[in-house]
Image (cartoon, grey):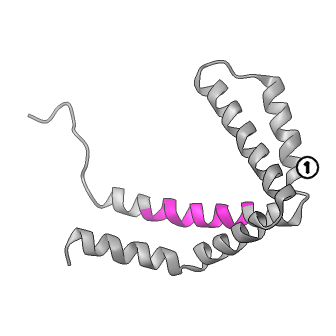
Amino acid sequence: MNAYDAAHQLARSLEESVEYVEYKKAKEKVKQDPQVLKMLKDLRAKQLEVQALTLSGKPNAEAQKSLESLYNIAINNSLIKEFLDAEERFAVLFTDIQNIIVRNIDFTLDSEEK
């Protein structure tokens, strides 16, 4: 099997995984409730803002506190909690697969190699 065929098979396997199916279902539920969707988008925007501040070397305690407050409110909504939990389970699966691939190939350039 060539690498492209294997990649397509892996994509199909991921698409059929319980983790991905649950994620898609939770995502559809969120999309059907405009208020919940807005709350989730606001949470994501605040996460990006805090992350950008942190990466720029300007962490902001007020922005972090605002994010934590927004998160605590958001997870009290059962649809958002279900979505975030499903998203996390799929992300763990996806990360595990990436780690398996990376561990099994040598894709580094050591400065000591000649």
For the point 63% across and 29% down, the residue is 52
Which residue appears at 69% of the width and 32% of the height? 49
Q: Is residue 70 left or right of residue 6?
A: right
- In x, y percent, where is residue 51? 65, 33
Left or right: where does residue 11 sit relative to residue 7? right
Image coords of residue 43 (percent x, y): 77, 45
Q: Main secondary structure of the magenta part?
A: helix
The N terminus lies in which quarter of the figure?
Answer: bottom left
Q: Quadrant of residue 84?
A: bottom right
Residue that lies at the very extreme toward the top in this rendered image: 58
In the displayed structure image, the side of residue 21 where residue 44 appears, left or right: right
Instruction: Kindly indicate the quadrant of the structure image that contains residue 61.
Output: top right
Residue 95 falls inside the magenta stretch = yes
Front residue of this view, candidates 37 and 85: 37
Position of 91 relative to 6 (above/below): above
Question: How many labels sit on residues?
Answer: 1
Tell me residue 38's x, y (percent): 81, 51
Q: Position of residue 88 (x, y in %)?
A: 66, 61
Quadrant location of residue 9? bottom left
Instruction: Pick the residue in front: 95 or 45.
Output: 45
Judged from the image, the secondary structure of the residue bearing numbered disc 1 is: helix
Residue positioned most to the left: 114
Task: Identify residue type, mark 1.
Answer: Ile
Q: Look at mark 1 in the image and give the residue it sits on.
A: 73
The magenta stretch spans which residues? 84-97
